[in-house]
Image (spheres, rainbow, N blue to C red):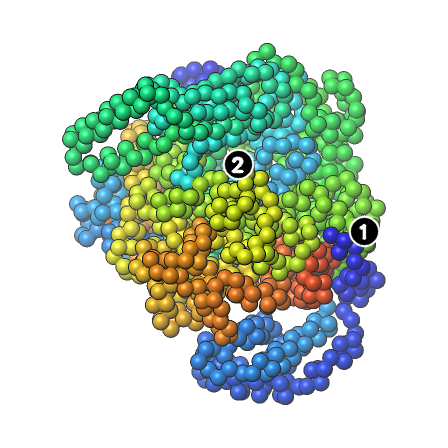
Amino acid sequence: MIVTRKHVSRRTLLRGLGAAVALPVLDAMTPALTAAAAVSQKIAPKRMVFVYVPNGIDMRNWTPATEGQAFQLPKILSSLAPVQDDVLVLSGLMDHGGMALGDGPGDHARASASFLTGVHPKKTAGSDISVGISVDQLAAQKVGTATRLASLELGCEDGHLAGNCDSGYACAYVNSISWRSATVPNPPEINPRSVFERLFGNEENAGDPAARERNARARESILDLVADDTHRLQAGLGQTDRRKLDEYFTAVREVERQVEMMEKQIAANSVALPPMAKPDGVPIEFAAHARLMFDLLAIALQTDTTRISTFMLAREGSNRSYREIGIPEGHHGLSHHRNDPVLMDKVAAINRHHMDQFAYFLNKLKKTQDGDGSLLDSTTVLYGSGISDGNRHNHDNLPVLLAGGSHVFKTGRHVRYSQKEPVSSLYLSILDAAGIPTDRFGDSQSRLQFLGDLT
Amino acid sequence: MHRFARSGFVPSVICLVAGGCLLGRSPQTSQSSAGVSLSYDQVVTPFVQQNCAGCHNEKLKTAGLALTKYHDLPSLLRDRDFWEKVVHRVRAGEMPPKGMPRPKPEAIAAVTDWIEQQFAEADQHTAIDPGRLTAHRLNRVEYNNTVRDLLAIHFKPAADFPADDSGYGFDNIGDVLSVSPVLMEKYLNAATAIANRAIPGDAIPGPTRMRYSPEHSPNDDGMALENRFDFPAEGDYDIKVSVSGRKEPFRLHLSLDGKEIKTADVLVQKDKPRSYEVRLHVLYGEHVLSSTMEPRTPSPQEVANAHRLKVEEEADFRKAIAKHPEDAKEIARQRAVSNPPTFIDAFEIHGPYNALRPPLPESYRRVFVCGHSPGQHNAACARLDLGHLARFAFRRPVTTDEVSRLVDLVAKGQNDGMTFEQAMRTGLEAILVSPNFLFRIERDPKPDDPTAVHPVNDYELASRLSYFLWSSMPDDPLLDTAAAGHLHDPNVLSAQVHRMLKDPKSDAFVTNFFGQWLELRNLDSVQPDPDDFPAFNAQLRLAMYTETKLFVESIVREDRSIIDLLNGKYTFLNEKLAKFYGIPGVIGNQFRRVELDGTQRSGVLTQASVLTVTSYPNRTSPVLRGKWILENVLNAPPPPPPPGVGSIDAAGGPLAGTMRQQMEKHRANPTCASCHMRMDPLGFALENYNAVGRWRTEDAGQPVDASGTLPDGKSFRGSAELKGLLAGNREAFAECLTEKLMTYALGRGLEGYDRPAVKQIVRDLSANNYRFSALISGIVNSAPFQMGRGEEATEVTASQVTKNIGGVK
């Protein structure tokens, strides 16, 4: 639903940008916050963002030479200088589920599918996709009801258009890192205009408040009706069809919740207003596209429209070329660099170009006030890839860095772990920090050490 | 297309119609074939001992395979999938490998034919398993088309939906198509948008702004812009076109529906905004706005202006560099980027002013079948209207209860203060987000019994047909045929297929099937390096696509042999593409049929579209092209390189020497050689075509060598000879195309139990000169297309989910 400025006063706008939405869920969770309880609740990292880059990284130019504080930023990370104190570079983490484990080729599909799930995906071209719930969705299930959108999935590259995806793996594995369940991926939204409309509504529902409320009521009735339809339908179906309709039903329930929330916000006159103009469409140049998406993401967090997001800067195995920085070759092709320094330098240039956009996002979060701290303080941001060296396709010693949440995590350091530490351990720690303590996730049952006072 | 009238149908269907003979024909029918009397020990054992056992024995197990562990027919049949591959590779001459003694062709034929016969025999005795189709969510194309056919609405509501994931190379695979909350949000918004257009309010639309300003890709010269606009009412509109980029002298033309409405000179003048506006009275509905530019001789004043602008710009540039010498490179880059050649930037339309009340759209008539005049609707009509709509939307008869619940919803809306029309919009929205509309769901009498094989019902068959041939819902005649219960009658079915392929809606089949099989869809996203390939621009891209589309369409519509896809000696060209190909005598923008005798082209392999989607942005890739042929023509996809080895040719980086010399060097590596000796020669044959498909005789200053040798020892020189070899192996291509088309037609991956149906279709093709109609007919008459079954209830997935979620405190 679109709300134009003339309907709501400036004061409501300000209320919409943070304070107006009550936080019952987080309040209820306070006892569960153990070490983090000492931290002012307003600056606890209750939001989380996971940013993914494909094809691995030129690790020569990623890993800082020294450990601990005051490390020298390597070339790829150089644009992080203004926020270095808010960043934790974590070396030596491993994505066990990405390994072949007898399944043969297909490292790209496995990397993206297992990165946030910690689960080895089932090798299939389509009939029985199965991996695991991803960390963002686990969090969304627990705290997503606090916001209108339980989570927001973004991307800069549309799904594969034609042909095969990766060595007998279905395209869903390379197109999404966010998985609602073992079998249902969350596709990323590519078009900034569509993201804007999800956050602020589209023209179809414009109108006076009475009409909008009436339409919202009609929507609820429609959703009730189709939910009921689903149950009637499921009765005589086999298990796969029932499962398909379960997916549908879950989606209906989620949207129903959003509609109810929107109704409440309309009633309380606390609907957030768009602080930017509606984007026209998808910019062609990567940097412009990525920054626009990061802008929208920052707004979504700032307005508390969602607290959980994933963002694929490109889909895994992407062969996009970056002519604007002088690289006409495809990224995936270059990542098979055969240790040729010329090709490796080009990979590093692409890695750095991605990182520059990410640094833009972190700077933006840092400059945005949120409660007693900045938006970066209240957000845990992870950046990484499920492949380390694109040439070797190895899934250990992954490029991973954490930013934000600096009242819980001891940021501004480079930490090196043993080569076998699963990246899933990091997710358990991130969940802890967000007040969602969990016994085990993916292939890990322990927290990652040395992150800060939390452990 | 008269071929569809033929009466030969596959045995399974005859059985089906006769009823009750799902166990197949009696064994006697094929007992007479010559080889059957020979035994395993007489045929397979000696061949394996002589040709395979040296490497593939239980000790060495080269490539992990031991052929010596099989001793009789039953053990061979148990590993059917494996032996199918063995037969394939031996027959293709790939095994025994180069360098080993090669068996005589007769020996190869004898052993492979014998095994195939045993397979066929085994299939006769195996119960038919048609497989089953998972509840199939409409994909984006199907959604758009279905809405179009349901309501006569022509905007594309699914354009904003998330991309559909593909499986098995296609985006209509039921198992893969899922529903996320994002998609559900979009379904709701789309339903609202559709309902608002289908049942417009009686208000006269007020003026709004419509704008179209696409991003320009590096390959687009920006000299033309075109867009379709929906004018909400008859009235006056301000129509504006604006130009950006460098100040250069052009003449600009603006047209509505092809009729010029404004001409203007784009002047070289400083600080002059360059937009050109005209007020026009426009009728209600869709109109195409287009604009083009052509260079113009500048006036003396403009020449002086241009000079002054250049001097000023140069001075600014120097000043900027002097101020920040360390950023000189970046400043130069930005200058290049921010100062593109003149291009047509945007259309903007304001209006309508002085609008007239818009006429009621066709959709209005489709919804309100009750027949009352506007504003006079009777609530009792709701039942009739909604029942009618739901039957089409759900593609089957609807129950009284289903309609009642929709009627109640509408009544509820009216009680809440909506007008009847507004409330009917709610009813329409409910239909459009119903699982009955969004999914194609087939009912199995015994859903949990995988042996409960049964013909799908007539409505389900109607939907299978219409989504196969139209990517859309069944129309009136098809639903009526289904209602009469006649669709399983082979003659009736054949007549429907014939009718449906003649319908323009079958364009969806051509676009979607061939667009994905040939990977033409990727043509939209390729970005050949504009420095290396300046000829490639938006118009050429479109021309390439159009050529291939028209060509494959001619195969379908003229019922030609599928082998023509490989080496048909004709194509469709316009002037732009003909010039690009160096083919004289084609003038104008119209595509027309062109005979290719005496040219360097024939079939899809040497069409620029296919050559471009199988290249890197900056150069050709024999590996990608070879892989494409293996996957899409020969049905023998190569495995990807093992980790650590890296792709020979994945780098796409600059290479010294010819492409071919580089490749040969890499192929010296034995790890790579086994696969690349299958892939690369195929690609080498196409080296005479550059990365955008233009003919060349030199690469990196040296003559192109387009010769090669296939793994079976057959050698060729150039693409024509390769195509000759490929076309000579008709069965392999027929099987490949059959599998691809069957996957698309069913919307599921093929399984071992589909093999008999595929082989039967290939035999039918061979008996019918490989005509395309035999392929379609074979598929729609096959057991997998006509039948369904239940599935085993395992509930593995549910426990899997719990396991993966992990314990939350």
Q: Which residue is denoted by mark 2 in the rendering? A: B160
Name the residue at the top extreme.
Answer: B354
Q: In which chain is the residue bearing label 2?
A: B
Which quadrant would residue A5 be assigned to in this image? top left
At x 35%, y 44%, the residue is B531
Q: Is residue B384 left or right of residue B742?
A: right
- Report crowding for label 1: few under 14, some 14 to 19, many 20 or more residues within 10 A (C-alpha): some
Q: Position of residue A384 (x, y in %)?
A: 34, 49
Residue annotated with mark 1: B492
Q: Nearer the viewer, mark 2 or mark 1?
A: 1
Considering every residue shown, the one lying at the far front of the view is B585
Q: Residue at x 81, y 54 (%)?
A: B491
Provide residue B449's location: percent of width, then percent of height. 70, 60
Dot 1: chain letter:
B
Q: Earlier in the sequence, mark 2 or mark 1?
A: 2
Query: Closest to the observer: B552 or A352?
Result: B552
Whether residue A392 appears in this view of the structure is: no
Q: Which mark is residue B667?
A: none
Q: Quadrant of residue B228?
A: top right
Residue B291 picture location, percent across and down: 49, 27
